[in-house]
Image (tube, rainbow, N blue to C red):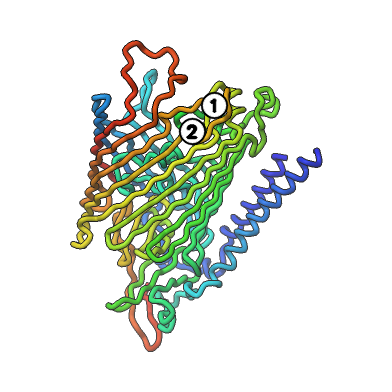
Amino acid sequence: MRKNLYFALALSCLCTLSQAQQISPAQQLITNEDSLNAGAAKSKTVISGYGSASYQRDFNAGVSTMNLDRAVLFVGHRFTDKLSFFSELEVEDAKVEGGSDGGEVAMEQAYIKFDLSPKQYIVAGLFIPRIGILNENHLPVNFNGVERPLVETVIIPATWRELGVAFYGSANSIPLNYSVGIMNGLNSEGFEHGSGIREGRAEGRTATANNLAISAALQYSWKDFKFQISGYAGGTVGLSKRAADSLGLNSGAFGTPVYIGEGDLQYSKNGFSAKALFAYISYPEADKVNAAYAKNLATGMYGTYGELAYDLLYKKQKKAQLISFVRYEAFDLNSSIPAAPFGIYDGTEKQSHLLLGLGYLPIPNVVIKADIRLVHTGPQNPALIINPPPNALPYQENNQVLNLGIGYSF
Amino acid sequence: MKRRDFVKTSCQICLLSSAGLLLTFMNSCSPAAGNSIFKTEVKNNQIEVPLSLFDKSPLQFVRPKGWNYDIAVEKNKDGYLALLMQCTHQSNQLISTVNGFTCNLHGSVFDKEGNVRKGPAEDPLKKFKTTISQNSLIINV
């Protein structure tokens, strides 16, 4: 069955790629000068990157930290006018040291891009599917706040990349962008209570490919608005059938599925901008996974946020931007749970965050940020506190966090 | 193979094959379908665009044959502005928005004049000189 699937997928890709490789007589006649005019990069290999550093004060904990959150190096190479390579190599938290926690060196993206036309292309390799707003546009100069929006971190994992193939395009006659992709699935064994589906990602490292996933997105622009809907559906058990059966899990390409639905809108006019996003994750067979791996996963999770921002320097029409913003986020990582005894509700995973902040961009590539985040969570469930430390302080449902940060991209 | 597996497999193959055919269909139908893409050829480093095109909309897209990028041409109070829809960061194709152009690869944003509003791009979009000859707009590439 899987062989047939792979064969059909390969056939679909080959059909499309063969179009990409067809060279028309007109294209063969393009001179070097025409090729340059047609937009071939002057330098075939491009190196660029982005990064951010932050200071954070957690008032409840009475702890301040400073961190080089990430430094990312892009390397891109153009083989021909229609074939190119893109990559992002990330170092998180400045260093990775054997034997100690923290830090990460990871490929954020590494894929070949096949241009089919000026408005359509295919990517193959480790790529970021179009889900949510931030996933594709995660550079620090492109979002407000020192931290990435939490909904797009804990519900939709930020910089979520997987191995696969995706097709992107834009319609010519209407302002519609579309994308569809197929990739390796998530790993249910990695899911953890309180982090959504984040820890189930393979991110290109020996992903299980017995299970697969598909994602698709539509973007439509109308006047000053941009709407998007996106979805993801994939299997989460990549084990052999025998191993899955022994754990009581459903295997196969889309066995023990997880579904994600997301919708967002963005507005921008005369220095004023607004964003709103809603995302929902459904994991109907969470009870089976909880039984198999002794976890406390939810069957449903949601997250939503709304943001208003205004560029205070917009009317001066300067290159610099001073963006003030307010953002309200709410999410519940266990909005629905399996029936007892396979699920225990955790009120601390239902949270709301109100952010007020400023971002100053002297040029579009450098940003200095400051914000304050007011946090509220639900109550702790005593049933989840096993062997509490004797010196543990009472759980506080309200907290304040001060963030200062810098970011760059080039 | 059980009948149920056979039906499921057949459906999945149909779905994937349909996706492949859909791509082909979208690829072939979209460029000709819209009246906002004007397909033409480069002759003597010049592209000729009929001025009547701008009666429909002040913003038009020109696709020179063999090029990998469209040219966005906007009629404004100062005349005509022709911008190459190629991101100056890593040469990705740009998407047109009401306020300008965006790049889906890394999120660069350009305004209607081609100036960078959001990085990582640092350079403005390539502009082509334009002249008017009789009833045509000449884009000098």
Residue found 37% across the figure and 62% down from its top:
B101
In this view, A404 is above or below A367: above
Q: Mark 1 points at which residue?
A: A343
For the residue labelled by badge 2, is the local secondary structure a helix, a strand or a loop?
strand
Q: Mark 2 points at which residue?
A: A334
For the residue labelled by badge 1, is the local secondary structure a helix, a strand or a loop?
loop
User: Mark 1 falls within which chain?
Assistant: A
Left of A349 or right of it: where is B115?
left
User: Mark 2 falls within which chain?
Assistant: A
In this view, A312 is above or below A147: below
Q: Which of B68 and A274 is in front in this view?
A: A274
Residue found 72% across the figure and 44% down from its top:
A4
Left of A104 or right of it: where is A62?
left
Left of A317 or right of it: where is A242?
right
In this view, A99 is above or below B53: above
Question: Upstream in the sequence, badge 2 or badge 1?
Answer: 2
Q: Which of A227 and A117 is in front in this view?
A: A227
Asked if disc 2 and disc 1 are in contact, CB closer than 8 Å, the reply is: yes
Residue found 49% across the figure and 59% down from its top:
A177
Q: Nearer the viewer, residue A193 or B107?
A: A193
Left of A225 or right of it: where is A311?
left
> Could you tell me if residue A114 is visible in this image?
no
**Image quarter in which the N terminus of chain A is found:** top right
- Kindly identify the amino acid type of the residue bearing the numbered disc 2: Asn
> Could you tell me if residue A400 is visible in this image?
yes
